[in-house]
Image (cartoon, rainbow, N blue to C red):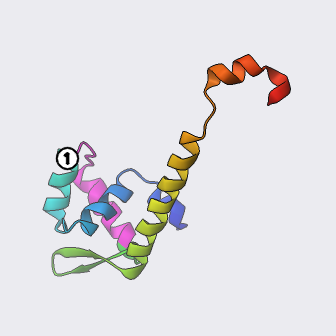
């Protein structure tokens, strides 16, 4: 499965961040996501964890999940995308100004 399909699914990135923060058992991940308003069903969480394992973004040792090197790097990429988005969000020209400029300035 292409990586963007995996990362784009509900809760996937949040799961990676929880594991990065050391929240790494199934129950603790579920509780933390519920508490943070990112809740997913237990079935969905199990599916996401399985997909992340299949993509080698996490590994399961005993009953705990850990980021792999690939998983750590994926979060670095996500953080860079968020920084890039914030940079360009700050650079947006307010719509009211665009309206004042008219079509010739676009």
Q: Main secondary structure of the magenta part?
A: helix
The image position of residue 54, as x and y in percent, is 40, 75
Please indicate whether residue 63 sits to the left or right of residue 49 in the image: left
Examine the rendered structure and indicate whether residue 99 appears above or below residue 41: above
The quarter of the rendered structure image containing the C terminus is top right
Give the residues in magenta.
36-52
Specify the quadrant of the image occupied by residue 100: top right
> Where residue 85 sits: x, y (%)?
53, 49
Q: Nearer the viewer, residue 93 or 15?
A: 93
Q: Is residue 91 left or right of residue 43?
A: right
Taking depth in this image into account, of 51 and 83 the one nearest to the observer is 83
Q: Residue at label 1?
A: 34
User: As displayed, is residue 1 above or below residue 60?
Assistant: above
| Residue at the limit of the structure toward the right, as seen here | 104
Q: Identify which residue is drawn at 44% across, 74% down.
A: 73
From this viewpoint, is residue 6 visible?
no
Residue at the spot 33% in from the left edge and 64% down from the top edge: 16
| Residue 103 part of the magenta segment | no
């Amino acid at each position: 499965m292409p990586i963007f399909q995996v990362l784009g699914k509900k809760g996937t990135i949040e799961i990676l961040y929880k594991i990065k923060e050391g929240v790494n058992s199934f129950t603790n991940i579920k509780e933390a996501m519920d508490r943070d308003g990112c809740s997913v069903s237990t079935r969905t969480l199990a599916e996401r964890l399985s997909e992340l394992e299949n993509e080698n973004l996490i590994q399961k040792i005993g009953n705990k999940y850990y980021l792999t090197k690939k998983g750590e790097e994926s979060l670095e990429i996500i953080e860079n995308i968020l920084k890039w988005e914030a940079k360009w969000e700050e650079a947006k020209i307010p719509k009211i100004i665009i309206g004042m400029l008219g079509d010739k300035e676009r």
